[in-house]
Image (tube, grey):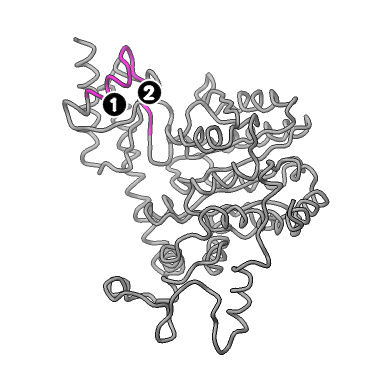
Amino acid sequence: MNPLAQQLNETLRTENPYVYAMLSSLGKAIYFPKEGILSQSAEAKTKASKFNATIGIATEGGQPMHLKVIQETLSAYNPKDIYEYAPPAGKPELRSAWRAKMIKDNPALEGKGFGNPIVTNALTHGLSIVADLFADAGDAVVIPDKNWENYELTFGVRRGAEIVEYPLYNERTKFNSEGLREALLAQKDKGKAIVVLNFPNNPTGYTPGPQEGNEIVAAIRDAAEAGINVVAVTDDAYFGLFFEDSLHESLFAKLSDVHPRVLAVKVDGATKEEYVWGFRVGFITYASDSAAALAALEQKTLGIIRATISSGPHPSQTFVLHALTSPDFDAQKAEKYDIMKGRANRVKSLLDSGRYENAWTYYPFNSGYFMCLKLNGVSAEAVRVRLLDEYGIGTIALGETDLRVAFSCIEEPYLEELFDTIFKAVNDLLTK
């Protein structure tokens, strides 16, 4: 094993042996080279006052070489903020701005121990880093039965982890914290579990309330006290789109110091929060009271980034930083929030109107981009195909009964037509 990896492992073993034990075999072996091209280039950037012949970019006229046909569409930005490689950890200014935003949006983080966010190539990349660092073949990844299918690819197919599901809702149609607790405690023999908490939930659009949030934290604490090392990942892809009296902060803050056997990891990003899906700018943040442990986790994360994508795209990081530091940012974001809330409320009023009686029920939703219908007497796939072939409407079938509808991409005046047509498609099939 490389001496740098051994040194990072020893730091983690000293600072928190439970976190060290959470690492996968790859997580133990990975490191960020301190004597390679990147480190030497970084040193040259600060000291090479005459010529810097280290980095693999072309320059012209004292700035990165570029094509006019590209720069003329980006003339508001300095070429150095677009064309050069971004650091593997991301633009330092962006990392600082996102950290400040995290604290502003999550006041409970004030005074907690957590690292500087590391820039990822959006949310999936952040989850992939978690999988690489912590998931070995056979490790349990605990998620609700209503989940984003990419978890299976990221943790199961890529890393060979075992996906362990529990029902998302209990008999009161609240978050099933007891089911989470049981799924975690079932990993006692393994001594380790990765739990992914995705709120607002994809596909249902559900976010737990404050009491449910406390129960989730308690379930994870119970697992830790039972001797299970828990990597607690908050997938906060749709953070901020809370339309009712649910949790309005990430559980990352409460999990950050809940127990020494719990490592809280926050994966979030500008992708959906700032409506920049194609920019692919996300973040991964670790919680710990130990600065040394945070530094070691960052170095291992940078090792994964260096070994996979090398660094994230610089232009989109610059664009997001520009937005975060703009005086118009909060007002513009509030405007889009109101639009999204209006769509969610309109959907709920339609579903509660009684006009679709007997065709379906719906799973509780209060946030995010989506909601799910539970169809009665007809398969979701049959309805999906009928909608697509006969009415030119796209939806997502999940399992036998569930149909996911993304109200985020349907403007409010058209929502009534959308659900009326889904109702028609269901009745078409019921009367065949």
Q: Nearer the viewer, residue 336 or 150?
A: 150
Question: Which residue in the structure is indicated by mark 2?
Answer: 402
Question: Which residue in the structure is indicated by mark 1?
Answer: 353
C-beta proximity under 8 Å, tags 2 and 1: no
Q: CA distance from mark 2 to mark 1?
A: 20 Å
| Location of residue 24 by image quarter | top right
Q: Where does residue 25 sit, x and y in percent of width and height?
A: 69, 42
Type of the residue with mark 1: Ser
Which one is closest to the eye, mark 2 or mark 1?
A: 2
Which residue is pictured at 60% across the width and 79% down the height?
44
Residue that sits furthest to the left in the current view: 390
Type of the residue with mark 2: Asp
Q: Secondary structure at mark 1?
A: loop
Quarter of the image with the C terminus in it: top left
Q: Is residue 95 above or below residue 48?
A: above
Residue that sits furthest to the top in the current view: 432
The span picked out in magenta is 371-386
Q: Nearer the viewer, residue 87 or 111?
A: 87
Q: Secondary structure at mark 2?
A: strand
Q: Nearer the viewer, residue 282 or 161?
A: 161
- Of mark 2 and mark 1, the one earlier in the sequence is 1
Q: Nearer the viewer, residue 270 or 389?
A: 389
